[in-house]
Image (cartoon, rainbow, N blue to C red):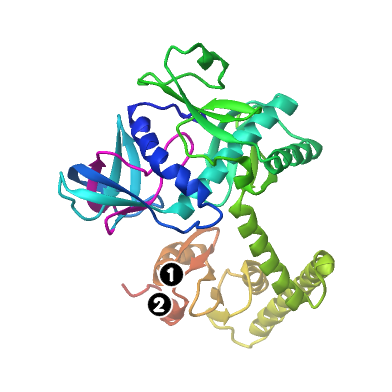
């Protein structure tokens, strides 16, 4: 199911609860958005189960609870599920199982017990705004440009509508945004109606067809004069409750489709608040007004690039000097060890190239002792092949080598002393300690 979430016996139960609470809740949207909406019902069943967290991790042990009726919307139709409480027990997930809405909780509830169900109204109203916003955008995009909606996703931060078009121009996005916000300002009513399965009016409703397991009447969301769409989701009662819609732009979709990204209602206000906070911080850091931020950052980027180039040249010169100093000694050592906090792979390879690795074994590292770093072991081919994996193991890193060089990343730079002892043993005896 995508944006046309059809209604079955489970949805009729949800709708019954919404009918008793939804009207009050929508009236409170602007006056009491945090008011706990409650509903008395009874526990039908409770059985042990596990819940896999959305972000991954170990399963959470708990119980699946079915109630006689519910005001919590199960996930489906592109809309996430509601949250709330059964008594004082948090509801962590609401899913659909056939005709039933299943509530996952972490405390057992007695079948037959009467309970008070509470709804997280802030989450619900956010979903209502995004879902009704999607219906509006979908309808206007179709009317203006003939772009059909093929799917949509109500995300945690932003929502996406997949349009059946390979691209949208900036002018089309601007015109679409202007049109949907005009409809919001016109305070267009949004109503819910039910049609019998055989009602001929069903043919006039936007839909991708009913699911195979559908039974009972069909629930239709009407945006007066704009759209009629089969849907079991939660919606505002008037477009004015959407407040505002902001189209953030498009992203390339799959199979010649375009993803239109949008925010609706309170999400627009939150995004504006975040942007304003960022703007204030940048004004303080850059010591200029918002209109000059971009140019100031460009100048900083240019300065950083120049400093990085100069720093790289200095490191190269330093690498050459270090190598020449080593080679100038009357009796060069068989082992050369060097560590620098600043440096990179090129720095180490320049030293190895300048010194030469036919007779000298080199162990070079760069990075902070308390963080990850880089290492290079260079020298006679047979020695490096034998010692390279052991050096990587001691440094808690990984590497690879060929033709007398073994290099990679290290996570335990503080163990450089152990590596040096291993190499000293090898150069003095010809074989490393076990």
Q: Is residue 94 visible?
A: yes
Q: Is residue 61 left or right of residue 81?
A: left
Range of magenta residues: 59-88
Location of residue 164 with respect to 180 vertically, above or below: above
Location of residue 31 with respect to 394 vertically, above or below: above
Q: Considering the numbered disc 1 on the image, is that residue within a helix, a strand or a loop?
A: helix
Q: Nearer the viewer, residue 5 or 39?
A: 39
Name the image quarter holding the C terminus: bottom left
Q: Residue at x 68, y 85 (%)?
A: 325
Q: Which mark is residue 422?
A: 2
Asked if marks 1 and 2 touch (Cβ < 8 Å), the reply is yes
Local crowd at mark 2 within 10 Å, few (<14), some, or many (≥20)? some
Which residue bears the numbered disc 1? 391
Residue 395 screen position, x and y as percent: 43, 72
Q: Residue at x 36, y 35 (%)?
A: 16
Q: Nearer the viewer, residue 19 or 171?
A: 19
Residue 86 in the magenta stretch? The answer is yes
- Between tags 1 and 2, which lies in front? 1
Q: Main SS type for the magenta part?
A: loop
Most extreme residue toward the bottom is: 330
N-terminal of the pair, mark 1 or mark 2, is: 1
Residue 319 screen position, x and y as percent: 68, 77
Q: Is residue 167 left or right of residue 239?
A: right
Residue 2 screen position, x and y as percent: 50, 30
Q: Considering the numbered disc 2 on the image, is that residue within a helix, a strand or a loop?
A: helix
Q: Determine the CA span between mark 1 and mark 2.
A: 8 Å
Q: Is residue 209 left or right of residue 183?
A: left
Location of residue 348 with respect to 124 vertically, above or below: below
Q: Which mark is residue 276?
A: none
Residue 253 screen position, x and y as percent: 62, 35
């Amino acid at each position: 199911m995508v944006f046309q979430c059809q209604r079955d016996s489970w949805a009729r139960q949800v709708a019954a609860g919404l009918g008793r609470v939804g009207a009050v809740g929508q009236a409170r949207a602007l006056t009491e958005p945090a008011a706990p909406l409650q509903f008395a019902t009874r526990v039908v069943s409770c059985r042990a189960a596990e819940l896999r967290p959305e972000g991954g991790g170990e399963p959470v042990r708990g119980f699946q609870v079915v109630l006689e009726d519910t005001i919590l919307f199960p996930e489906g139709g592109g809309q996430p599920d509601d949250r709330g409480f059964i008594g004082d027990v948090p509801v962590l997930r609401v899913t659909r199982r056939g005709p039933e809405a299943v509530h996952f909780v972490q405390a057992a509830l007695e079948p037959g017990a009467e309970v008070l169900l509470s709804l997280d109204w802030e989450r619900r109203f956010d979903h209502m705004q995004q879902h009704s916003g999607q219906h509006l955008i979908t309808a206007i995009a179709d009317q203006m440009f003939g772009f059909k909606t093929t799917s949509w996703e109500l995300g945690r931060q932003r929502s996406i509508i997949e349009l059946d078009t390979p691209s949208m121009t900036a002018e089309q996005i601007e015109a679409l945004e202007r049109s949907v916000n005009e409809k919001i300002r016109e305070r267009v009513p949004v109503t819910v109606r039910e049609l019998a399965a055989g009602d001929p009016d069903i043919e006039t409703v936007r839909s991708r067809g009913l699911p195979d397991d559908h039974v009972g009447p069909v629930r239709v969301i009407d945006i007066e004069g704009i759209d009629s769409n089969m849907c079991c989701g939660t919606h505002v009662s008037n477009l004015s409750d959407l407040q505002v819609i902001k189209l953030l732009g498009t992203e390339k979709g799959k199979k010649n489709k375009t993803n239109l990204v949008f925010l609706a209602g309170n999400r627009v206000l939150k995004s504006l608040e975040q942007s304003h906070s960022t703007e204030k911080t940048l004004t303080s850091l850059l010591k200029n007004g918002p209109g000059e931020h971009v140019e100031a950052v460009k100048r900083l980027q240019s300065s950083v690039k120049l400093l990085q180039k100069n720093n790289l040249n200095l490191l190269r010169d330093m690498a050459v000097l270090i190598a020449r100093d080593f080679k100038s000694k009357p009796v060069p050592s068989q082992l050369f060890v060097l560590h620098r906090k600043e440096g990179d792979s090129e720095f180490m390879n320049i030293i190895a190239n300048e010194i030469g690795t036919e007779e000298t074994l080199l162990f070079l590292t760069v990075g902070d002792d308390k963080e990850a770093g880089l290492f290079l072991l260079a020298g006679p081919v047979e020695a490096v092949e034998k010692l390279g994996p052991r050096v990587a193991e001691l440094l808690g890193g990984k590497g690879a080598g060929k033709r007398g060089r073994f290099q990679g990343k290290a996570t335990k730079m503080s163990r450089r002393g152990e590596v040096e002892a291993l190499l000293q043993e090898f150069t003095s005896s010809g074989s490393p300690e076990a």
